Image (tube, rainbow, N blue to C red):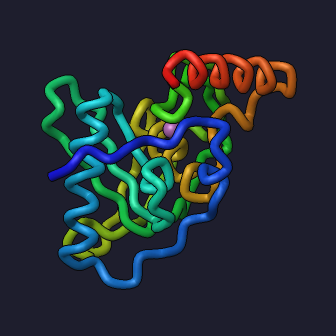
Amino acid sequence: MALLSILHYPDPRLKKVAKPVSVVDERVRTLVRDMAETMYDAPGVGLAATQVDVHEQIIVIDISEAHDDLRVFINPEIIEASAELKEAEEGCLSVPGIYDSVERPDRIRVKALNKFGEPFELEADGLLAVCIQHEMDHLRGRVFVDYLSQLKQSRIKGKMRKLERESA
Ligand code: NI
């Protein structure tokens, strides 16, 4: 197991589009374990492979209080989304300390492969639906900040640069 380093916004590598995983093998399962360990250590409720500079369609999520309900989605696809939208506050391990509201479909149905390469479908609402959509955005090179106004985006970029300078 290993802790992976997380890219910080506005790193251009966060804009890369992830490729589908062709074979779910030991290499992928090791990456999933490392991503889960990195997410729990941060701590966060979700992590996409893009955030650890691996551009493959893999996400891990655990929204449980006890951190004992790890969900793995490989090659996830949203197959249904409710017309009804809901606004929720989001944060991101790649944009530390920033939280803002984003509006997304309230309920979704997603299909994906599990860590054994077996297909499954899941219906989600609430926090889980928000997390899945947020992490799937990372796989196509989008960060939640991209939904905010230009003014907010430039403020956030400024804050992130200041943080980088302070930690350098
Ligand atoms: Ni994120």
Camera-side residue of 41 and 64? 41
Residue plotted at (40% across, 51% down):
123
Q: Does residue 102 show up? A: yes
Q: Look at the picture and state if 20 lies above or below 23.
A: above
Residue 15 screen position, x and y as percent: 66, 53
Residue 48, how many percent across, how many down?
44, 50
Q: Residue furthest right?
A: 150
Name the foreground residue: 47 vs 75: 47
The picture quadrant where one finds residue 5 is top left
Residue ranking furthest to the front: 168
Q: Is residue 42 left or right of residue 29?
A: right
> Which residue is more in the foreground, 45 or 95?
95
Q: Picture quarter containing residue 22? A: bottom left
What is the tally of numbered marks visible in this picture?
0
Decide if residue 88 is in sight here. no
Query: Taking 46 as reference, is 43 above or below it?
Result: above
Name the residue: 13% across, 37% down: 68
Q: Quadrant of residue 121?
A: bottom left
Residue at the far bottom: name it: 22
Question: What residue is drawn where x is 60% and y is 49%?
Answer: 14
What percent of the width, then of the height, locates residue 143? 63, 41
